[in-house]
């Protein structure tokens, strides 16, 4: 019987997402990934080489999913609050992604997964914001790179720093994700008006 390489690779990636999100690159164990995937752990080494390369593959895969799910078009650049809300929705549905980025930021600062491709992707977003600023649909009071960084930081902070939400904004924390999303959208719209 032929081995379904693509299916096995995807099973390993899916299992690795949860393992890395929960334990980080250093705490993750390939044996647990293999067990979650129902695959012999030797397949991890065959398909990915080692645990670090598996983490890179996980990040690349998850970044592609986010980029496809929440693109930033010229029309959407005119309302970055709505864009931030859609990114918030994605992270609410896929909470592991922000954790993966946090682990990467904490542990892998000098060797970022797919840095060139990601830089190009962010350059496209910055170009979209620049065009919106030039045509007057978005404030030009803030540098487009700084603005994109602020939107990303504001959006991900709800998921990476929930303790600050509880301490700084108890009513917002008690209001749940809908209230948090509303606060984010309002804040980003004020920032970009």
Image (tube, grey):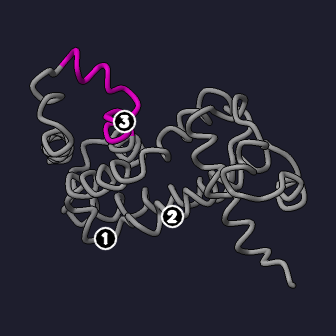
Disc 3 target residue: 159
Residue lying at the far top of the rendered structure: 167
Vertical order, 172 against 58 (above or below): above
> Which of the two residues, 128 or 5, is positioned nearer the viewer here?
5
**Residue occupying the point 34% across, 70% down:** 73
| Apparent side of residue 141 relative to residue 15 in the rendered image (left or right) | left
Per the image, is 165 magenta? yes
Per the image, is 3 magenta? no
Determine whether label 3 and label 2 are within 8 Å by CB. no
- Magenta segment, principal secondary structure? helix
Q: Earlier in the sequence, mark 3 or mark 2?
A: 2
**Residue occupying the point 56% across, 57% down:** 62
**Residue occupying the point 43% across, 62% down:** 127
| Apparent side of residue 48 relative to residue 138 in the rendered image (left or right) | right
Determine whether label 1 and label 2 are within 8 Å by CB. no
Q: Earlier in the sequence, mark 1 or mark 2?
A: 2
Q: Nearer the viewer, mark 3 or mark 1?
A: 3
Q: Nearer the viewer, mark 1 or mark 2?
A: 2
SS at mark 3 in the image = helix
Marks 3 and 1, how far apart at CA: 27 Å
> Which of the two residues, 48 or 77, is positioned nearer the viewer here?
48
Disc 2 target residue: 65
Q: Residues within 10 Å of mark 1 (few under 14, many from 20)?
A: some
Disc 1 target residue: 74
Where is residue 26? Give x, y as percent.
72, 29
Vertical order, 1 against 108 (above or below): below
Q: What span is colored magenta in the figure?
A: 153-168
Marks 3 and 2, how far apart at CA: 18 Å
Residue lying at the far bottom of the rendered structure: 1
Vertical order, 114 against 6 (above or below): above
Q: Residues within 10 Å of mark 3 (few under 14, many from 20)?
A: some
Where is residue 22? Give x, y as percent.
56, 35
């Amino acid at each position: 019987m032929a081995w379904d390489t693509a299916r096995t690779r995807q099973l390993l990636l899916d299992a690795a997402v949860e393992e890395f999100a929960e334990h980080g690159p250093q705490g993750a164990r390939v044996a647990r990934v293999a067990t979650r995937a129902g695959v012999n752990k030797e397949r991890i080494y065959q398909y990915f080489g080692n645990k670090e390369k598996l983490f890179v593959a996980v990040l690349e895969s998850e970044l592609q999913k986010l980029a496809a799910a929440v693109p930033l078009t010229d029309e959407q650049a005119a309302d970055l609050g709505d864009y931030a809300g859609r990114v918030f929705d994605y992270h609410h549905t896929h909470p592991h992604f922000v954790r993966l980025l946090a682990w990467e930021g904490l542990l892998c600062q000098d060797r970022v997964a797919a840095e060139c491709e990601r830089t190009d992707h962010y350059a496209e977003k910055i170009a979209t914001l620049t065009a919106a600023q030039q045509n007057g649909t978005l404030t030009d009071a803030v540098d487009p790179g700084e603005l994109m960084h602020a939107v990303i930081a504001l959006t991900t902070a709800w998921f990476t720093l929930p303790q600050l939400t509880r301490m700084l904004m108890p009513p917002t924390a008690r209001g749940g994700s809908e209230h948090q999303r509303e606060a984010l959208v309002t804040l980003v719209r004020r920032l970009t008006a």
